[in-house]
Image: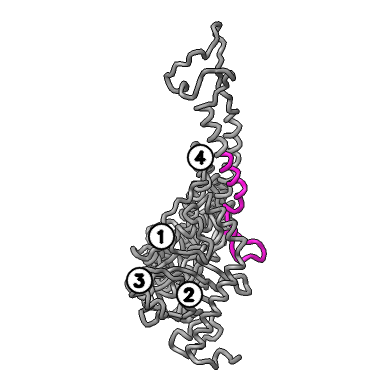
Amino acid sequence: MPLLAELPERDRSEDKAHGLIQRLNRLQTNRGNFEAQWEEVAARVLPAYVGSFYGQRDQQETQGQKNTSELYDSSAGIALERFTAILDSLLSPADKIWARLAPSDRSLLRDRDTALWFEEATHILFQELYRPGSGFLGQNQQTWASIGAFGTGSILVTADPSSMGLRFSFRSLGETYMAENAAGVIDTVFSVFWLSARQAAQEFGVQALSDAARSELIKNADRRSKYLHAVYPRSDADPDRIDWRSSPYASCYVDVREGKIVQENGYAGFPFGVSRHWQAAGEVYGRSPAMAVLPGIKTLNEQKKTVLIHGQMAVAPAYLLHDDSIMDASSIFPGGMIAGGITADGRPLVQPLHPGDLRIGKDLMDDERADIKAAFLVDLFQILVETPTMTATEVEERSAEKATLLAPTVGRQHDEYQGPLISRAIDLLMRMGKLPPLPRRLQEAGGDYTIVYESPLSRAAMAQEVAATARTFELAAMMANATQDPSALDWFNADEIVPAVAAAKGVPTRFLHTLEDVQAIREARAQKATEQTAIQAAPGAAAMMKPVAMMMGAGQKARMK
């Protein structure tokens, strides 16, 4: 069997295509247990995804099929919507800056040009995120919903040639297959999607299509076929080349039906932002709040079904009749007259069948709903509503408590999802020339940067430090005032505190003086104080000079005599 490199170009392409298809089949097989659970979750929490977790399903079926025939309770679906809103508002609030770029060496922020560069780069980044047509807002919300329902969500970040900007594309978990590297980081994504012959020609060009697809352009241009987009680390990357073969990540589009590569390219960085809610040991895909309370969701659905049946019986009950009664069903209607329904002494001969105590069913359902709300974090955000008379201090403490409880739950979103997404966006913006040139100091530092998150959740955590500093300073000021000894204030380093608090509060760099400006202001203040002291001392000095002058004059006269 010859080596792949020894084969002719066409044969190498076919072998690569078949190899990628085989790996896709393995990735599909490896997650069979997950797909069964995801289908159960979809049926009860996110019905639009029912049937989407079977990679080989036929895409020719009629769209818009009803998927809610077995759904009786919508509590879990509503909780998922609120969970999505919670993550969106806490981690990526729309039209707000929730992360900033900063130098890895924070001392570089003392250089005004460097500080202004990072401020401008952050502004450009979020301007691009919220640009109409980038798709970020909607795709990001779909990712949060996927994380809440299925535990895993992903977005593809690419350059949009039509707008010379960024393009964000959510990838449905049902059609996305993943693999980790040795460090447990997702570095391989296989996406399966369906295109008509006409769409494939628009996407890849007619000449790149398989013979069958080109034939369908004439016979049935709307017939759909399965395609694979495989993104994975390239083991044969050649950094000396100037084409896609130098890219560390491969990008291959394959016509699965025909086993043909229709487009091959590469990425300079991993183009996906992938997030998992939490992971069990040895598993690639995440587990979700919905999966954690799936037994409760299923129980609630059955309870609701039972309560609805009994509720209907309570409103329109069955009747107990004597076995020789002459009544029939047509006698039981609103305003109807039931002859012979009672005896001459008023004893009823017809009685409704008691359906049971509906209150017990409601209590049981409320217990399940409480667990579901807790899993989707909904209960944490009912605190302020339930106790609206809290003081400002109590509100601050409750907010800090919520931030503490939420930090472990959503903290990994920074590391796995938002960080890689921002890094990928910055890399593309730099390559497109949309960022300003690096200032000299930053160039000398190698351009290294980090991401400082300023979402409401991150700010809540920083607010605790700011509030603690403020309370401690107030206590020291009270001690200094009471004792008339200012030494208690000597512990506070104002030159460190003020910039740190300004950063925590999100004060723009351009609103603050530079370090040189601060030093100049202090020197001017010291000079003015010196001059003021001299002015205040001048009358006393003049008064002292008069007797000295008189004494010197008297001495001079004595010498003249």
- Cα distance, mark 3 to mark 1? 33 Å
Determine which residue is flagged by label 2: 257
Residue 413 at x, y = what percent? 54, 61
Helix, strand or loop for disc 4:
loop
Q: Which mark is residue 391?
A: 4
Q: Looking at the image, is 194 positioned above or below residue 237?
A: above
Residue 555 visible from this viewpoint: no
Instruction: Inspect the image, locate mark 4, and give the three-letter code of the amino acid beneath it.
Output: Thr
Q: Nearer the viewer, mark 1 or mark 4?
A: 1
Q: Which residues are magenta?
A: 277-304
Q: Identify the residue shown where x is 58% and y is 91%.
A: 3
Mark 4 nearby-residue class (10 Å; few <14, some 14–19, many ≥20): few
Give the residue type that dot 3 points to: Ala
User: Can residue 99 be seen at all in this image of the molecule?
Assistant: yes
Query: In the rendered structure, which disc, 2 or 1, sits on the residue that comes first in sequence?
Result: 1
- Residue 400 marker: none
Residue 243 found in image quarter: bottom left
* Label 3–label 1 contact, CB within 8 A: no
Give the quarter of the figure containing the N terminus. bottom right
- Residue tagged 3: 221
Give the answer, above or below, for where 379 lies relative to 431. Answer: above
Q: Earlier in the sequence, mark 3 or mark 1?
A: 1
The residue closer to the viewer here, 123 or 240, is 240
Residue 511 in the image, given as x and y percentages of width and height: 38, 62
- Residue at the far top in the pictured view: 345
Residue that mark 1 sits on? 137
Which of the pair 496/339 is nearer the observer? 339
Binning the other alpha carbons within 10 Å of mark 3 as few (below 14), some (14 to 19) or many (20 upward) gives some
* Separation of residues labelled 3 and 2 (CA atoms): 16 Å
Say what amino acid the circle numbered 1 marks: Leu
